[in-house]
Amino acid sequence: MRLICLLICMPVLLFGQRVKDNSLNSEWRFAADPVKVGEKEHWQDTSFAFGSFDKVQVPHCFSTDPRYFFYTGTAWYFKQFEKVAAGDEHVYLRFDAVFYKSKVWLNGVLVGTHEGGYTPFEFDVTDLLKAKNTLAVQVDNSWDTTTIPGAKTYAPYSSAAQRQVFPWINYGGITRPVHLISKPAIHISNTKIVATPDGNVRVKALIRNSGNAVASVKVNVNVLKYKFSSREVKVAAKAETIVEVSGTVPASEINLWSPDAPNLYTAVVSCNKDTVQSRIGFRKVELSGTKLLLNGEAIKMGGCNRPLDYPGYGSMDPQEVLEKDLGMIKSGGMELSRISHYPVSTALLDWADEHGLLIIEEAGNWQMTGRQMNDTGMRRKYQSQLREMMERDWNHPCVIAYSVGNEFQSQTEEGKSWVRDMSAYVKTLDDTRLITFASMLLGREELKKGEDEASQYVDFVSANIYGNHLKVLQHIHQLYPDKPVYISEFGIRTDAVKSEEERIAHLKKAMEDFRQCDYLIGASVWTFNDYFSRFPGTNPNGYRPWGLVEPDRSPRGMYIAWQEEFAPATIELVDKKIRITARKDFPAYTMKGYRLTCNGTSYTLNTLHPGESMLIDVPLAGGTANVTLIKPGGYTIMQKTLK
């Protein structure tokens, strides 16, 4: 019932893939409004002449335009389009993301507002459509102490400079696609699908009746060739109801989903005239003591943080950039990631589903103060953004956990209350994923017991550690001996050392420390790429140079070193033979379907469980072996020369 209450309010969210999806991307008109005269001068009216404004292509990030570089404030977008042929269906105007606040008018009528820069929203515009339509969108990318993310209220532990600036650039605009989507009056508003390794599939379908009369509906579910028992219910006019359907696919007919075998299937959910297709993966993520289990096997993996920032695109994520980045991340062995401080694009999660990445999703609360975390309005705002992320993404097999924040004062009563309450809130929406948050305070000696800090309320501990890695990890384990530990951030800036070689040495020392901690399940490097920022310590060129790769994604020496350190195996030359050993310290997981090439010849490796080895007798050219380790999917994860 809670799900119904949450989704019944406008704006209504859309999930699944619809056939009648009309793109409103391509050419729009754009204008900045720095003195906020737009509404006063009625720019939203259909009679307003916006033809002299700039032409832009949506998705659009105005912050990358040299004229508006770092511009903070109000801007407007305008679009004219012809009415779609919808018949008796309802038409919804959907925005995949607008940063940060938006007001939307259609044909001069305010259809709704939204706050939150990374999640989708939509409005039913059926009754407003005409033969020719004018769409006006006001966007405001301003951050302050009431926005999430945003600036901090006064706190004695932070400097005035840190409170007034933001950790990353507030890239403004309609940064993700816009659609007009036609749906029957009785339609599937959302689905939540859980598929487990035993072949069991549980479906919750949220059915909306936009009509004026009570309707009888029948919900059917098909997975593979199997049709589950249908359910019939009545839905009141202008109301929603949840229908639950479950069934089983024979385990012998499915292959489980994992990073090295990302097997996907299609679940088809239909209700009267509406059909939604969702890709699903049969898999199970759970904890056993200090172990993270995927499909019953313990895994320990590397990962990364990827700030959404690319030269010329800002916070947009075009497919060519996304595929380039994620391909490098996969090839770098970074497969278990707290990948961003905010909801990522659906396209990123689709790629992760298809190619095998494990994702910890996070929504907002970057270093919020106690005053902010105690504020009822801020809590509701955060829950709204968290809910929008979860309801959009909970059918993705790649998503294994939710994080409820990053680097806030988790040792305070406000911090503990936040984690306790938000963890409980997450469980009301989705109890199939793990919960965590990223703490920067767990190395403090004044923390004597687990009850002193908010990690007592989460499934596994996440810690941002910059130095003294082993000492901090041991202290965390003393506080929480029964919980797995995930390093949500570690790394070093390029300009914090004299050379890249020194930076690589720092990495190798950190990895030596990690390998002494059996309770460590993952480590996410900060960062995959350099990123623009206004935060103190940013270089004069605007970048914070933490990346394994440069802004244009040219790999630094650290990326190459990281490949070998994050690889699941060691490779060495022993008595003129190649010995491959699956690591049992960190990273550690079963290697199945891997290949090795040596001097141009390819060899298929045995399935290697952590700690197991195999020898390959290979012809050596002058006693030298040029070897490449290739994981399923064709990703080269290690290259080296052995002598």
Image: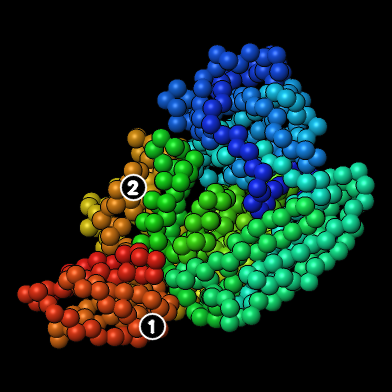
Q: Quadrant of the N terminus?
A: bottom right
- Residue 102 appears in which quarter of the rendering? top right
Apparent side of residue 399 relative to residue 109 in the rendered image (left or right): left
Taking the spot 44% from the left edge, 64% from the top edge, the residue there is 335
**Of the residues shown, which amino acid type is indicated by label 1?**
Thr
Apparent side of residue 46 relative to residue 406 in the rendered image (left or right): right
Other residues around mark 1 within 10 Å, as few (<14) / some (14–19) / many (≥20): some
- Residue 109 appears in which quarter of the rendering? top right
Apparent side of residue 183 relative to residue 402 in the rendered image (left or right): right
Front in this rendered view, residue 575 or 473? 575
157 over 523 or under it: above or below: above
Q: Which mark is residue 607?
A: 1
Q: Quadrant of the C terminus?
A: bottom left
**Of the residues shown, which amino acid type is indicated by label 2?**
Arg
Image coordinates of residue 583 in percent, x first then y, are: 35, 79
Residue 280 appears in view: yes
The mark nearer the N terminus, 2 or 1, is 2
Image coordinates of residue 280 in percent, x first then y, are: 60, 65
Taking the spot 48% from the left edge, 44% from the top edge, the residue there is 317
Q: Which mark is residue 553?
A: 2
Say what secondary structure mark 1 lies in. Answer: loop
Taking the spot 39% from the left edge, 66% from the top edge, the residue there is 633
Q: Which mark is residue 263?
A: none
387 over 139 or under it: above or below: below
| Label 2 to label 1: alpha-carbon separation | 33 Å
Image coordinates of residue 194 in percent, x first then y, are: 67, 68
Q: Nearer the viewer, mark 2 or mark 1?
A: 1
Say what secondary structure mark 2 lies in. Answer: loop
Taking the spot 14% from the left edge, 83% from the top edge, the residue there is 576
Residue projecting furthest to the right: 213
Q: What color scheme is it? A: rainbow
